[in-house]
Amino acid sequence: MKASKTLYLVDGANMVFRAFYAIRGLSTSKGLPTNALYGLTQMLLALKRDEKPDYLVVVFDTKEPTFRDELYAAYKANRKEPPDDLVLQFPYVKPLVEVLGIPTLEKPGFEADDLIGTIAKRLASDGLHVVIVSGDKDLMQLVNDHVSILDTMKKERIGPAEVEKKFGVPPEKVIEVLGLMGDSSDNIPGVPGVGPKTATKLIQAYGSIENVIANVEKIKEHTKLARLSRQLVTIDTAVPITITLDGLVATSPDQTRARQLLTELEFTKLLGEIAPSGTLSRADYRLIQDEKECDILFERAHKCERCSLDLETTSLSIIDADIVGISIALAPGEAFYVPVGHQLELGERQLSKAYVFEKLAQLLQSTTVEIVGQNLKYDLAILKRMGLQAQGKLFDTMIASYLLNSSGQHNLDVLSELYLGHTTRLRSSSYGGQARKGKKQVTFDRVPLDRARDYAAEDADVALQLADLFRGKLAEAGLKTIFEDLEMPLLRVLMDMELAGVLIDASILKKLSDVFGEKLHHLEKDIAQAAGGAIFNINSPKQLGDVLFGKLQLPGARKTKTGFSTSQDVLEELALTHPLPNLILEYRSLSKLKSTYIDALPELINKKTGRLHTSFNQTVAATGRLSSSDPNLQNIPIRREEGKEIRRAFVVPAGFVLLDCDYSQIELRVLAHLSRDETLLDAYARGLDVHAATASGIFGCPVDRVTGQQRAVGKTVNFATIYGQSAFGLSQQLGIDPKEAASYIERYFKKFPRVSAYRDDVLKRARKEGMVTTLFGRRRLVPDINAPHPQVRQAAERVAFNTVFQGTAADIIKRAMMAIHADLPKLSSRTKMILSVHDELVFEVPEVDVEKVTSFVVEKMTAAAVLDVPLVVDVGTGPTSVKTIEFWVNPVTTTE
């Protein structure tokens, strides 16, 4: 008989962990990671929407020991600590679930599985079907005709038939199989030598662990372990709890509490869905559709000290985008939309582009009107492509937000909610499902004018109000100078670099694709042979884990909720004992190079220019570094021959060469300047090899006796110091014992004593102020620097110390870029600065101008900052990137 009601029991911990790994990189403007919380919220909302449960509860574990800990002291002993970014989110999980109107349940001394099992057994009936929401296989022992499992991530529904298909036995026998095979993720021992397949066969043959013990001699030898493991995996279905269905009814979200919490977490989109606020007044959001109105608008704009500008376009590509309309805000709540490229409906009208662009060009040429906008680089690049250039001051609200808190989110919707308490209109809700700019749905030129006005004018209005607010905040924080004198001028530099693009020879990449495809084909054969003839999907972590730890029985298996871990660090450890892991690593590396660069780059070459146009981001890396995206050109590997082959495809036109100018050890030079360590200062003043000097201190030998291998260690330790690496982290990198690594660090600080003292000073100030600053005043908030959790606190300390050097180095190269950009056209009008890659700049230079451009660039780079040690620039030239020095270096792992 079909159940008339449904009860959904959500495995809270399982859902949180899965949400954490499904979404990465989200954090608030105060630096709080929020990816797990955001994912959890979306999953729960989807569950309520799609499943429409009659009853719903999220069940959690508690910290208190359970009966399993009493049975077996090593229970879950090998579980890794949760990642720092997840630990910080734990305090928000239950409050978040509760403000969504969903009941929660936990009981000290019992795991969530036991509560789920108890409720399922007690309440499941012909009239109530229980659905367990989890990806945990252990819960399959609870499945019956009235209890099923829903795996929302895999979109699988599991009933008795599905359990038997997976385990080879019915649900009531699952504990027998689990007891024999054990579970490494929970450190349940099982019977030595018995894996999943053997366990299944034994239970199929004998029915229970007790019968297996009685009939199989090898198992009888491990009777105690088998019985213990069965107890550990058996879910307790008799937990003493009082539970009624009336207490498991999901309600509507608590609007007030939801708004407070979601605002704190900066979940702007969810705020609009769950607890929407009012909107800004739109009484003065007006369409401009005739020349007289247009004249009045621009006359007024010319008289303003600042006005906000925003373009609506047909594409995110600055090369391909056509302008659909222009929105201008002159005062808070007063904004205008000028349509110029809409596909008009009956009765609609718009001005010609030529007429409007002439008016806009005059406004942009004004040096008295500040142009305000969100992500201005995009808008200004499109306008420049059309011959319209902004001559006056600029104020980019996205960059202002980033300077105030580099770890936060900086899109307009988030900023509006966070600073103005206003939820912006989303096209998905306001315009019949049309997405925000850039999404591949209905383009903006098809949006009716009245709707386009509301959306576009609001963007300009919000940006204007944010600019007025941020102006004061930047001044209060001491960031006005770095905003006005560094980041805003740099915006123009990056815009020109993006418009210039990079020339790529697609034919080289096509040939490489065939070569890499053949290499991968041979690797597949080698992998199959190393796997003992097993044919499996190399790209499937689950299948690979089964081969490594099931078929081959390699040591060191680490279980996750979805199977064995096959991460890079696991494979690197296993490579010491078997050839297969190393082949897998090689396969992954080549496969990633092929998909990310060789096959992808030709598709990104713009058809109009024949060049590849990356985007340079000022608001992504929290230290202040520039980043590159669409595509990322900063991580093409330098040390592998395959990386060199890819870089041969980056070329220049006939008569030109590539010029690469790279700061030498700039972060270590910044360290010497800031720490005032005499030994380090002296080494740079005398032009000594600092890596060799460090090695001499570590190994206790004269500098001239340092071997190449010792120098390599010295180099690693130098950068490990800047990145705040622990002895354990250094030991992993060098492949040595942690005690030996600790001794290296100790000797390093003896060699350079002021570095240790300076680090203490930086961290002391950070604990007091909650932030660190670079030499030029850039700041980064480090809210976890005083966290009680040691792992979280230590991670914040690494971030804090690293940011001082990486951020200062970033400021220096930005200053150099501005100086070069200002004077380069007068020296060599055909030379283009085309790339910035961490500590280096790449130029496309006419052959006849190479000598003078090289001297000019080196001069500007070395003069970008006055330090107590000289800045040194390494130079390389060539027809392709292969000939340049350290071009597109694979960066050392940082704390970003």
Image (tube, rainbow, N blue to C red):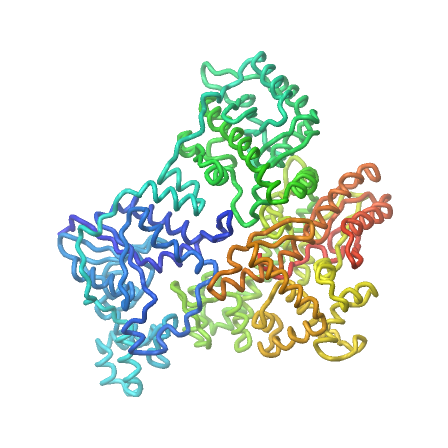
State the residue in front, 528 or 820. Answer: 820
Quadrant in which residue 150 is drawn: bottom left
Q: Residue at x 80, y 54 (%)?
A: 875
Placement of 319 over or under 324, stated as above or below: below
Q: Is residue 236 above or below residue 401?
A: below
Q: Where's residue 178, x and y in %?
A: 30, 72
Residue ranking furthest to the front: 768
Relative to 11, 714 lies left or right: right
Residue shown at 50% from the left, 39% from the top: 415
- For the question of whether residue 498 can be seen, the reply is no
For the C terminus, the image quarter is: bottom right
Residue 865 placed where, x, y %? 76, 51
> Position of 131 compared to 543: left or right?
left
Q: Position of residue 345 (x, y in %)?
A: 46, 18
Residue 571 visible at all: yes
Residue at horizontal 49 percent and vertical 25 percent from the top: 333
